[in-house]
Amino acid sequence: MTKPVKWGVLGAARFAQNYMAPAIHAAEGARLAGLATSDAQKAGPFKAFCPDLKVYDSYDALLSDPDIDAIYIPLPNHMHVEWSLKALEAGKHVLCEKPMAMRAGEFEALIAKRDQTGLLAAEAYMIVHHPQWQFVRKLIADGAIGKLAHVTGAFSFDNREDTGNIRNRAETGGGGLRDIGVYVIGGARFATGQEPEAVQSAIRWENGIDTFTEIRAQFPGFTYSSYVSIRMHPHQEMVFHGEGGVIRLTAPFNARVFGEARVELHRPGLEVQVTRFPGDDHYKLQVEAFCRSVRDGEEYPCPLEFSRGTQQMIDKVFDGAVPL
């Protein structure tokens, strides 16, 4: 039997508790082995589904354990680069929550350290592992909607009441663009394989964080528009509009949580073909792809270079935005 990749989680974040730690525990080829938290009570929900989990009282203690192969980092955004580099220096493979860096230039140190150590380091950008996105990319490449003309994206939720949330704090790298803008931007880049040539944007600010961002961009083969907000009713959608049809994703980013993942292919004559993906867990698929890359050398679908490209567009959105 192939030896599983032993994972440690750096911090008892709520997202890790609810999604990624269970995904690691359930993933083929993976074993959830450790959790670093200075608050022993926070380890309780993790041990409820993984009783053998070893709890470390510091991040450094987890990183120094030679029995741990890979580290998952769900820390606040401003801590991602620092602890990713520390984990790589400790000889661990790294899967770090998005955005992995606050600015595109910070990826250079991550890429250099990855190449120096020969370890796998990647941003936890789970949607590229979901078969609905792989299906959409193939539809576009195969010409199912003819020449692509325009892409639209939307992602919103309302967390104004959760004032202590790191997404509502400027000092932790909060705001909507870093948290969910990666999806409307990275999703378009992944599906089309193209990079923006020009970007325009407008941002509504609140206490130092962006709460609504509107983006318009020109790609080599199509135009693009999207918005993200953390002050609006929950909604998500991606639409790829071609000269010969339309592709629409109804739950592109939080499949199963927001709703069933469905890809609609609108064709001439008002024909609509619907392909459903009811049971796929992109968090589990992400972990399994990571483990195959570590264990078997399989090419990882979301390298740091891809994540850097998304961050480069985010930087342009921030740098060129007019206030709303």
Image (spheres, rainbow, N blue to C red):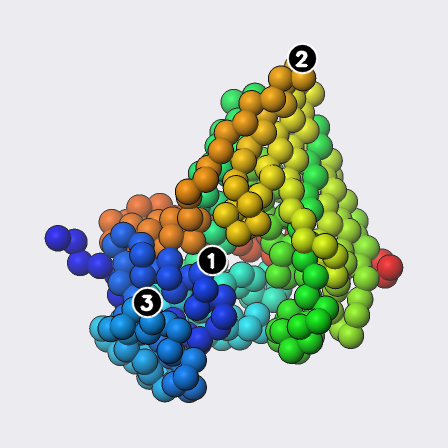
Q: Earlier in the sequence, mark 1 or mark 2?
A: 1
Q: Say which amino acid is labelled 3.
A: Phe
Q: Tell me the tag on residue 49.
A: 3
Q: Quadrant of residue 173?
A: bottom right
SS of the residue at dot 3? helix
**Residue at image x 61%, y 54%?**
182
**Residue at image x 36%, y 68%?**
71
Dot 2, crowdedness within 10 Å: few (<14), some or many (≥20)? few
Q: Say which amino acid is labelled 2.
A: Gly
Q: Say which amino acid is labelled 1.
A: Ala
Q: Earlier in the sequence, mark 3 or mark 2?
A: 3
Q: Tell me the tag on residue 269.
A: 2
- The residues bearing labels 1 and 3 have C-alpha atoms spaced at a distance of 22 Å
223 over 159 or under it: above or below? above
Judge left or right: residue 36 versus residue 146.
left
Judge left or right: residue 69 versus residue 1.
right
**Residue 93 in view (yes/no):** yes
SS of the residue at dot 2? helix
